[in-house]
Image (cartoon, rainbow, N blue to C red):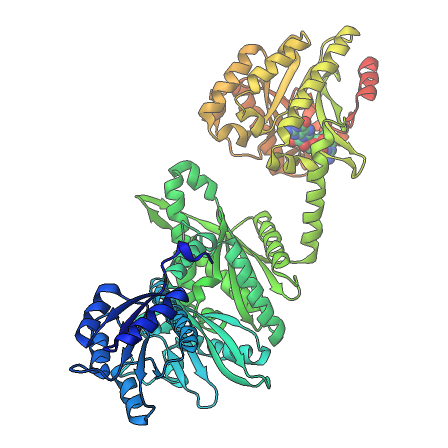
Amino acid sequence: MNQSEIALPLVLVIDDDQTIHLWAKRHLSAAGFEVVFAINGHEGVDAFKKYSPDIILVDIEMPEMDGFATCSGIRSVPGSSNTPLLMITGTEDAERIERSYLAGATDFIVKPINWQVLIHRLRYMIKASKVFLQLEKSESRLSKAQQMARLGHWELRIVDDNLYWSDEIYKIFEQNSDSFTLDQPGFLNMVHAADRLYVDEGFEKAIKNGTGLTIEYRIITGTGKQRFVSQHIEIIKNQQDQLVALTGTIQDITERKDHENQVRHLAYYDVITGLPNRTCFLELLSTALELAKRNGRSFAVLFLDLDGFKGVNDTYGHHVGDLLLKEVSRRLTEGLRRSDIASRYLHHHNYIADVARLGGDEFTILLNELTQPEDAAIAARNILKWISEPVLLEDHKIFSGASIGIALFSQDGQDGETLLKNADVAMYHAKKMGKGNFQFFHDFMNIKAKKRMELENYMHQAVANNELQLYYQPVIKSVTGELIGAEALMRWESPQLGFLYPVDFISLAEENGMILKFGEWAIHEVCRQYQDWQKKGMGYLSIAVNLSSLQLNQISFVPMLKAILNEYQLDPAFLVLELTETMIMVDSEKILGTLLELKKMGIKLSIDDFGTGYSSLSYLKRFPLDSLKIDRSFIKDVTNNSEDAAIVDAILALAAALNLQVIAEGVETGLQKEFLENTACQAIQGNVFAKPMPMADFQEYWKSH
Ligand code: C2E
Ligand code: MG
Ligand code: MG
């Protein structure tokens, strides 16, 4: 260290003996000290105040104010306590030494003074006092920091179970260090009852493993408030590896916990209903699984989907939809709490957690500790009853319902995801069974669901891979037997799934929207084919194509149709679009506009499967229709069931009144054909003449007719 850069250590010498001054000056200056002198006690105290020396030498034997008095005088100056003070004494008697220390001396030295020894002593004492000062400073800084961090330290001695807390811990626990009897039982008593075992185990674990450990738990403070703390536990062992003490810190982490809880709430709970969300439900499920596996118990997962929720949203708006979800959530939680199923099977302390909203209009219910599957059925039946009670939301009386699927642990799945998925599959089945009911999961459902998924997968490439085909079924004019038209019927030749009929894939294509692509392809294909026939000079036939409601509702439908007809330069009069009754009854105003536009283009419109829907006469009158197709179901028994015969007669009368052509569909037998030939029915389509056939076969058929 370069001496010139820092101030030299300053020694104050208080002595009435001038020769000491001289010796001190010589030896101490030479050793790198700066020295100031005082000739008596009074001057000495003044000099101390004036120079703030690093160390003081005081002679005990002085007139007037002796060394003891001088020492006391200096020590009474504020801030003096850290300055080392050395007494110079002529004799080494015990009483003087005792009095020196009492007066506040740090050490003493006996005359005659050995200056070389003294110099080393001074250096050491100054250094020690500096270190001490620094320590004090950093200790006070540390305690300030700890105060700010709400962090305190503690120590538990093993020999006598003596527990020590720093001030900050007393503050965190809101206890008074004077009145609070601090021991381990007293401390544990302040830990939240539900966390005591956990804290106890934490200590045991730290001791057993011999390593540090941090635990977080709740405490109830002296004023009865709940706070979260984080406690760090360190193990202190002696050289023989025996445990001597535990020590560590305790920090108040209430604010952080509150924040974490907020974040957790957002991540784990549904905003609209306040119910646990999917993530949370899956965790609840895994807890239930563990418990059930351990105890050899069973439980049920109920998957609930509201019936007609989309309709409520579309009709009354999302706001009312949200209100309905809240109401359903209320009915579920309250109903389950009230019912005796609940008291037997739901966790009594957090029943709410066992109802969750997965998203959309899907809810799940976890029925714990099931003794028999019938109990899940009872719960499901009750739930359906609660949900189907009408609800008044903003002056709208809304009738809701639900479909429920039930999966049981362990027969329907060994893990949460599987159980949830299978409950979903069962729910889907309940929908298929007509909604408003519940279904237990069965393995065959999964096979169905798997098939469906496969179908859906391959469906996406069907158009691109040219796997679709159109079959044509002739339409024959009754009486004359003349070929007047054909219906184009879709087939799917899938390399993976085989040859598929519409019944296998149309409804799925309608559900997932693929029907739009398929339908467009069919129109394209019919037009392309028709143009080819035109080029070959085959003559005129009307070709019917089936439409799905999705297509008709597409804004781009009419422009798309125009573009295709334009592409093949075709007169649209050959084209018949087949619609169903339900398709035009729903949202009829919008559909009417579209149909009028199609009509204006010269396209013909036909009602398919007539008699199976619920169209009214007044509606039919408004639509620009050309023909009706009597559904196969009426034709089937027309010769041996007088009711069906009467219906066919009625449809024919109706058609005549509306000036519509009639085509009888699905005519299979000669008897049926004869029956129809004796009525006003103009056209017949059915196996009795020809089954639907591939394009090439149909072309031959056409040529020979
Ligand atoms: P649809 O429009 O009522 O078609 C008539 C159905 O009756 C056809 O079934 C046809 O093969 C069948 N059929 C005709 N004559 C007889 C008969 O004498 N006996 C019996 N048992 N059946 C007969 P397919 O081809 O299986 O089509 C079923 C349904 O699929 C169609 O009913 C139609 O609604 C739909 N579909 C077919 N192709 C398409 C399409 O390209 N687009 C749309 N959206 N739907 C289509
Ligand atoms: Mg049809
Ligand atoms: Mg039909």
Counting labels gives: 0
Residue 666: in sight, yes or no? Answer: no
- Let me know if residue 56 appears in the view: yes
The residue closer to the viewer here, 502 or 346, is: 346
Give the quarter of the image for residue 121. Answer: bottom left
Question: Above or below — where is 523 with respect to 204?
Answer: above
Q: Residue at x 26, y 71 (%)?
A: 80
| Residue 147 image offset from top left, x and y in percent | 33, 65
Name the quadrant containing residue 683: top right
Residue at 61%, 64% in the rendered image? 408
Name the one closer to the observer, 289 or 436: 289
The picture quadrant where one finds residue 503 is: top right
- Taking depth in this image into account, of 75 and 485 the one nearest to the observer is 75
Q: Pinpoint residue 57: horizontal percent, then vertical percent.
A: 30, 75
Q: Which image quarter is the C terminus in?
A: top right
Q: Relative to 56, is 256 above or below? A: above
Tell me: 280 left or right of 694: left
